[in-house]
């Protein structure tokens, strides 16, 4: 029979001879949380200090124009139409290169993820070619494709392709095998398993890949435009630098940053819509 | 429809897992497979269900499955295997999408399966919003939707807490009561085996061989009676004495692996 009396505990307390003390809390930390407004407040604070330092003459405006001067430069570019002219060229190149690279990357990534032959051949090629800085291939691509838009688009497409292929086949590999076996156990045909099990299962990895490839595309478009383009944000930034128009140069950088933020936001919206089940 | 394991042998590379395992599951019969860890119980079930090709021997079936059966050999998985991006209703509908059933027929089948698994109020819920027991109910509803002749259950209760296990065990007993559906029930839990099965195939440690086939001398209805409990317990003890030494050896082997 179990002894449910309190005597043993009381006795222990008496033996210990002291007052009961609270157990010290040891479980704090290791769970950082982002504040809702703190990031924006910090950014505004930094911009404010920058403006004050520039306005007080502490910083040479030739080397670092004030935020107000940069905003003014963006406004001037916008009303003159030059901003849209340059941005539209960059968007066209990024759009075409990203779509080409993404479609090819998804096809090759799925092939590697699903076919033994494609995997044995494809992974070797991708491992060998992925580390090459794609911008180094631009002169070769100009030689092959001429000096128009094609080599710039091809450079972006190549940069996007490898990362997409890797994220797609990693995503396919990460799909839980038990889900595939479940579908097979119900005699679901191969194409339907790919469409209804593997594609949605690999989607988180594919969308994470989109985030990376969007940055790669932005990086490559600026590099390619700096090397050989008359119009585009990269060409504009380089030209402004050559003419020591640092307010315009930084205006270009701000626009690139805003573009990157907009793409990131777009991908977040896509993730929220497509991966709501997570 | 009978399911026959005919001299099934399986190796993973040089590791021999199953050695000439033979037995038959008669129509409407529930056969439990028990044995020490690593004796090849789940491998055997995968072979019986056509998900794994045996190194030697064959899984066969005899007779005709019920005419309305869409998938005569249907699995219920230990980890539920639910599509996390699909709702409960979509998960149950998933195996029907590629059958000849029309949309309205499918809806009726899904409704019936959800009702039988007490899930009608959860049709729009995603798996992550459900408890383990409810997830397994979805797995059961999905299996029922294709009207199987034989359910192949791979430790379906092992991922669940004891109360949920008890509730689902009652559901299994109810579902299998009329004998219209047979089952192969892989488990390491001897209590589950004696409560549910008509016969219990005891496998030896790896490579798994049929060590003994034990028949349960009580109908499933009788097993619910209080006076049957002593008999079931002694059967359970008998089974345990059959596998105890090998279970200890198998555990040591796992620890040293």
Image (spheres, coloured by chain):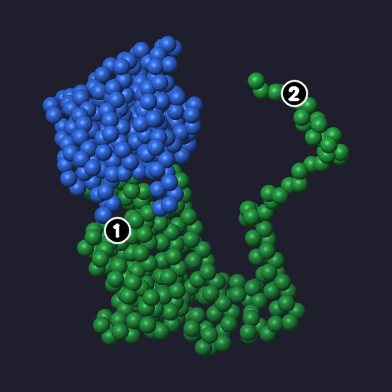
Q: Which callout, 1 or 2, points to the residue nearer the camera? A: 2
Tell me what residue is drawn at x 39 percent, y 37 percent. B245
SS for dot 1? helix
Q: Are marks 1 and 2 in contact (CB under 8 Å)?
A: no
Chain ID for label 1? A
Residue named by callout 2: A5
The green-coloured chain is labelled A
Chain ID for label 2? A
Front residue of A3 and A55? A3
The x, y position of residue A221, in whole percent, is 41, 75
The x, y position of residue B40, in whole percent, is 30, 42
Kindly tell me whether residue A27 is visible in this rendering: yes
| Marks 1 and 2 on same chain | yes
Residue named by callout 1: A113
- Image vertical order of residue B211 relative to residue A263, above or below: above
Q: Quadrant of the N terminus of chain B?
A: top left
Front residue of A31 and A73? A31
- Image vertical order of residue A106 relative to residue B203, above or below: below
Quarter of the image holding residue B22? Answer: top left
Going by the image, does A206 lie left or right of B198? right
Tell me what residue is drawn at x 30 percent, y 61 percent. A109
Q: Which of marks 1 and 2 is nearer the N terminus?
A: 2
Tell me what residue is drawn at x 37 percent, y 25 percent. B238
- Image vertical order of residue B116 relative to residue A113, above or below: above
The x, y position of residue B206, in whole percent, is 31, 44
Callout count: 2
Quarter of the image holding residue B33? Answer: top left
């Amino acid at each position: 029979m179990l002894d449910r009396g309190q005597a043993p505990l009381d006795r222990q307390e008496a033996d210990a001879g002291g007052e009961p003390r609270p157990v010290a809390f040891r479980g704090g930390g290791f769970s950082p949380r982002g504040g809702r407004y703190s990031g924006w407040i910090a950014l505004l604070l930094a911009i404010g200090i920058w403006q004050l330092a520039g306005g007080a003459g502490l910083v040479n405006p030739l080397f670092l124009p004030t935020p107000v001067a940069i905003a003014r430069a963006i406004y001037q570019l916008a009303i003159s139409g030059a901003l849209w002219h340059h941005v539209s060229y960059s968007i066209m190149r990024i759009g075409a290169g990203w779509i080409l690279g993404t479609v090819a990357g998804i096809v090759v990534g799925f092939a590697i993820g699903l076919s033994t032959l494609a995997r044995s051949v494809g992974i070797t090629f991708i491992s060998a070619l992925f580390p090459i800085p794609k911008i180094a291939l631009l002169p070769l691509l100009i030689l092959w494709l001429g000096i128009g838009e094609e080599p710039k688009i091809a450079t972006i497409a190549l940069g996007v392709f490898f990362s997409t292929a890797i994220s797609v086949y990693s995503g396919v590999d990460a799909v839980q095998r038990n889900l595939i076996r479940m579908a097979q156990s119900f005699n679901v045909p191969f194409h339907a398993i790919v469409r209804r099990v593997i594609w949605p299962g690999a989607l988180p990895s594919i969308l994470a890949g989109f985030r990376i490839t969007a940055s790669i595309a932005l990086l490559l478009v600026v590099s390619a435009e700096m090397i050989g383009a008359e119009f585009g944000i990269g060409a504009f930034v380089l030209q402004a630098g050559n003419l020591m128009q640092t307010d315009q140069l930084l205006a270009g950088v701000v626009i690139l940053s805003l573009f990157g933020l907009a793409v990131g936001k777009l991908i977040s919206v896509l993730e929220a819509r497509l991966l709501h089940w997570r | 429809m009978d399911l026959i394991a005919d001299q099934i042998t399986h190796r993973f590379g040089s590791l021999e897992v199953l050695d000439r395992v033979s037995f038959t599951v008669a129509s409407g019969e529930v056969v439990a497979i028990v044995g020490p860890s690593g004796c090849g119980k789940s491998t055997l079930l995968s072979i019986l269900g056509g998900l794994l090709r045996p190194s030697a021997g064959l899984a066969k079936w005899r007779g005709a499955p019920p005419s309305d059966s869409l998938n005569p050999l249907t699995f219920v998985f230990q980890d539920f295997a639910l599509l996390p991006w699909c709702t409960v209703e979509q998960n149950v509908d998933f195996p029907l999408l590629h059958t000849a059933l029309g949309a309205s027929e499918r809806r009726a089948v899904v409704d019936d399966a959800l009702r039988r698994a007490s899930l009608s109020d959860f049709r729009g819920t995603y798996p992550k919003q459900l408890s383990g027991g409810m997830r397994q109910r979805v797995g059961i509803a999905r299996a029922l939707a294709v009207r199987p002749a034989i359910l192949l259950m791979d430790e379906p209760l092992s991922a669940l807490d004891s109360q949920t296990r008890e509730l689902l065990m009652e559901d299994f007993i109810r579902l299998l009561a009329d004998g219209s559906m047979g089952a192969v029930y892989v488990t390491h839990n001897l209590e589950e085996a004696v409560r549910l099965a008509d016969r219990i195939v005891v496998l030896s440690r790896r490579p798994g061989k049929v060590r003994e086939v034990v028949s349960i001398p009580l109908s499933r209805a009788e097993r619910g009676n209080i006076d049957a409990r002593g008999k079931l317990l002694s059967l359970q003890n008998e089974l345990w004495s059959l596998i105890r030494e090998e279970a200890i050896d198998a555990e040591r082997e796992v620890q040293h692996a």
